[in-house]
Amino acid sequence: MKRIIAVLFFQFAFLSFFAQDIEYARRIIDTLTSSQFAGRSAVSDGEKKAANYIANEFKTQGLKPFSDSFFQEFNFPINTFPGELNVSFDNVNLIAGKDYLVDAASGKISGTFQLVWYNKENFPSKKQLKKLASRNFFDNKFIVIDDEGVDKENESFPLLKLNIYNAAGIIFIENKKLTKHLSSTHNEFAVLRIKRESITRDYKSITLTIDQLFIRNYQSQNVIGYVKGSEYPDSFIVFCAHYDHLGRMGNEVYFPGANDNASGVAMLLNLSDHYSKKTQAKKTMVFMAFGAEEAGIIGSKYFVENPLIPLNQINFVFNMDLMGTGSEGAMIVNGKVYKNHYDKIVAINKKHNYLPIIKSRGKAANSDHYWFSEKGVPSFFMYTMGGIKAYHDVYDISKTLPLTKFETCFRLIRDFANDL
């Protein structure tokens, strides 16, 4: 009987340990996706608030910084939409994020403008466009481009997209979901992306206000801390995840970024908590939360060009993004580049049955691992698959993020790192 009680106690303690991980993860994701953090980009200092939050977690966990603080600051240009945002057609108001997006490189604008529609039925030739432009036809008008069924080799197609005919703005009709991005440049004209079901050919005019601000030298920061190794302090294993997202679009709409990438930050902070409090690693464990990933993997590039530790002493970099699902397993970018390491993580997964499958891809410049591997530092980028499809939109929220395999992903990454 005593043995049974002991076994049950051990199992309860084991499960409670990992239940605390998932509870902590939920708290992190809820916090980072809240309106207080405004989508974790340049508007309303959302990115800085997130960086301070992570730095405070590092400090509470007992991590040490490599300098006077956990921050490594850098600057980059970014286009933002911090204020008023309204769009309507013939007095029919559209909802930002649901019906339309302001293109990342859009300029500011305010007023009412006539619509000029082009689709496969009347898509103009280059000669026709030139003739219209010579008469200033496009002045104070918005060009609506419906390119469904249009030959993309049509020479006038890129000219319209680039707005070389000086229209007040361009509207692209989107057949698929609205996907938001960031831009380090901006146009002098407005650009909108509108879902097909939210616009009709019956509309004759558009009334809109877009408040836009281009920040030439926005200051961001990486947040970096470490736990010193007990036997090989000069050998480093790096865990990383980007904490920034897409920020706000107007006064009311922001992009929460639960899966992308509050989930990766939650995994990062679970790992830093584990190695700072629950186990002593032989090698130095470094934890990097990168800024400006969404703007072009800028934070990690800055680190690699200005390393706080010798790159040749980094044994491995494990980058984590989109860690909130996992019902269909996970993908390892660079798995085909570092085959021995990939075989190792697959063997660990097979032994413990952590995930349904671990797939591999080759080299890709799609997240913060990239600059490390370009410098010859072995690096993985892991993301989970299956479940919700919300990505770079207003629907990537904490409430619907399932964290299906978060706990087992934690164990898989931990076991892989311990085996390095």
Image (cartoon, rainbow, N blue to C red):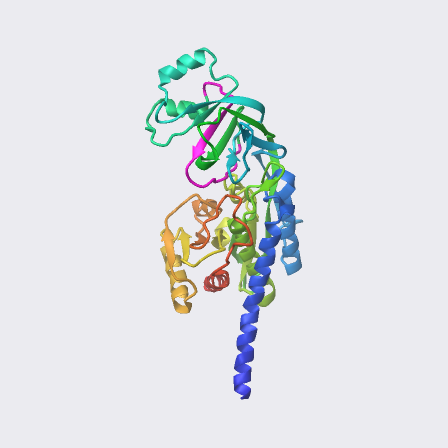
Q: Is residue 46 left or right of residue 411?
A: right
Q: Is residue 172 magenta?
A: yes
Placement of 337 over or under 405, stated as above or below = above
On the image, the x and y values in percent for residue 199 come to 47, 32
Q: How many marks?
A: 0
Q: Farthest residue toward the bottom?
A: 1
Give the prevailing secondary structure in the magenta stretch. loop
Q: Farthest residue toward the top?
A: 135
Q: Is residue 363 left or right of residue 220?
A: left
Quarter-wise, where is residue 385 in the image? bottom left
Q: Residue at x 48, y 33 (%)?
A: 193
Q: Residue at x 47, y 47 (%)?
A: 372
Placement of 370 over or under 277, stated as above or below = above
Q: Nearer the viewer, residue 408 or 132?
A: 132
Q: Residue at x 41, y 61 (%)?
A: 345
Q: Residue at x 50, y 60 (%)?
A: 406
Placement of 183 over or under 390, stated as above or below = above
Instruction: State which region is magenta.
Output: 164-184
